[in-house]
Image (cartoon, coloured by chain):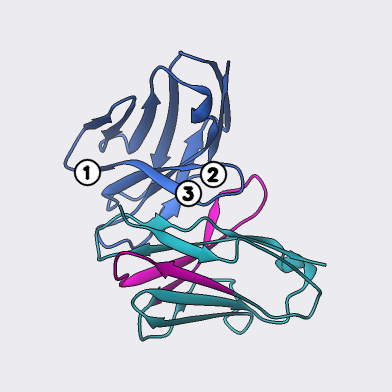
């Protein structure tokens, strides 16, 4: 089945550091990738929708300068949390779809802890 | 926009019993309803989905039912096993993945 790989699985770093998270579709070309954020015991909240070769569409309230998304190819999207602060600590999950009207396939998530 | 509610928020069942999780949605244009299982510290895995042209779908011990008129859909797990313990999320979206909204999740615990 469709596999989405997310890396790294865990990041611990100091406040002010920028952190890059990669999301790769391993066995299919993803037309669209999504980035979610999940707080403890809460549901997934969509941050942005990313289409290859175009600018990401951010959800209301998500700072695009804070959370930089690059979708350079049909198999790779990256989320960069710039100048991270403790309040950015969270579980970030990406997903990808092959084409419209297809289910999303999720990565295993990245747990980001900012000290 | 779409709003998805999910109940119960927590559910404990004895091994071998059945578990039912219910979701309601608000947007009548939604026509795709997946269910995801999230194990501790991991991403979500699609376990079953249903489209609006079908009322019920089964896959071994898992089934999903959809009532479009009432705008609700349910996940049924029979003969539960400890490895079924996880958080389950329902979601609703339109044809092209737009307005993809998750429910708040249900933490299922299967007691041995």
Q: Is residue B3 above or below residue A58?
A: above
Residue A29 located within the stretch drawn in magenta: yes
Task: Label 2, secondary structure: give it.
Answer: loop
Task: Pinpoint the chain carrying mark 3.
Answer: B
The residue lying at 29 percent from left, 56 percent from top is B94
User: Can you give x and y, in whole percent of width and height, for residue B105 in the image?
Assistant: 53, 41
Picture quarter with the C terminus of chain A:
bottom right
The residue lying at 29 percent from left, 71 percent from top is A29
CA gap, disc 1 and disc 2 = 21 Å
- Shown colour of chain B: blue
- The residue carrying mark 2 is B104
- The residue carrying mark 1 is B52
> Which of labels 1 and 3 is toward the front?
3
- Could you tell which of marks 2 and 3 lies nearer the N-terminus? 3
CA gap, disc 2 and disc 3 = 13 Å
Q: Is residue A10 left or right of residue A75?
A: right
CA gap, disc 1 and disc 3 = 22 Å
Label 3 environment density (alpha carbons within 10 Å; few <14, some 14–19, many ≥20): many
Whether the residues at callouts 1 and 3 have beta carbons within 8 Å, the answer is: no
Residue B51 located within the stretch drawn in magenta: no
Task: Label 3, secondary structure: give it.
Answer: strand
Label 1 environment density (alpha carbons within 10 Å; few <14, some 14–19, many ≥20): some
Considering depth in this image, is A109 or A59 the residue closer to the camera?
A109
User: Which numbered circle lies on residue B44?
Assistant: 3
Q: Which chain is painted in cyan?
A: A
Magenta stretch, overall SS: strand
Task: Label 1, secondary structure: give it.
Answer: loop
Highlighted magenta segment, given as a residue range: A21-50
Q: Is residue B33 left or right of residue A72?
A: left
The number of discs equals: 3
User: Can you give x and y, in whole percent of width and height, for residue A99 in the image?
Assistant: 25, 66
């Amino acid at each position: 089945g469709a596999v989405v790989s997310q890396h790294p699985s865990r990041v611990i770093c100091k406040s002010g550091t920028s952190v890059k998270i990669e999301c790769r579709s391993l066995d299919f070309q993803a037309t669209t990738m999504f980035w979610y954020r999940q707080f403890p015991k809460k549901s997934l909240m969509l941050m942005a929708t990313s289409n290859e070769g175009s600018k990401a569409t951010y959800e209301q309230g998500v700072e695009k300068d804070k959370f930089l998304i690059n979708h350079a190819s049909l198999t790779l999207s990256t989320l960069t949390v710039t100048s991270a602060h403790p309040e950015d600590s969270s579980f970030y999950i990406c997903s990808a779809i092959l084409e419209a009207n297809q289910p999303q396939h999720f990565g295993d998530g990245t747990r980001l802890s900012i000290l | 926009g779409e709003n998805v509610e999910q109940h119960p928020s927590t559910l404990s069942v004895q091994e071998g019993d059945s578990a039912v999780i219910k979701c309601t949605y608000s947007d009548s244009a939604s026509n795709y309803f997946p269910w995801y299982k999230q194990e501790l510290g991991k991403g979500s895995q699609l376990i079953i989905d249903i489209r609006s042209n079908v009322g019920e779908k089964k896959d071994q011990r898992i089934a999903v039912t959809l009532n479009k008129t009432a705008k609700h859909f349910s996940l049924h797990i029979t003969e539960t096993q400890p490895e079924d313990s996880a958080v389950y999320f329902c979601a609703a979206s339109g044809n092209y993945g737009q307005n993809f909204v998750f429910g708040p999740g249900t933490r299922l615990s299967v007691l041995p």
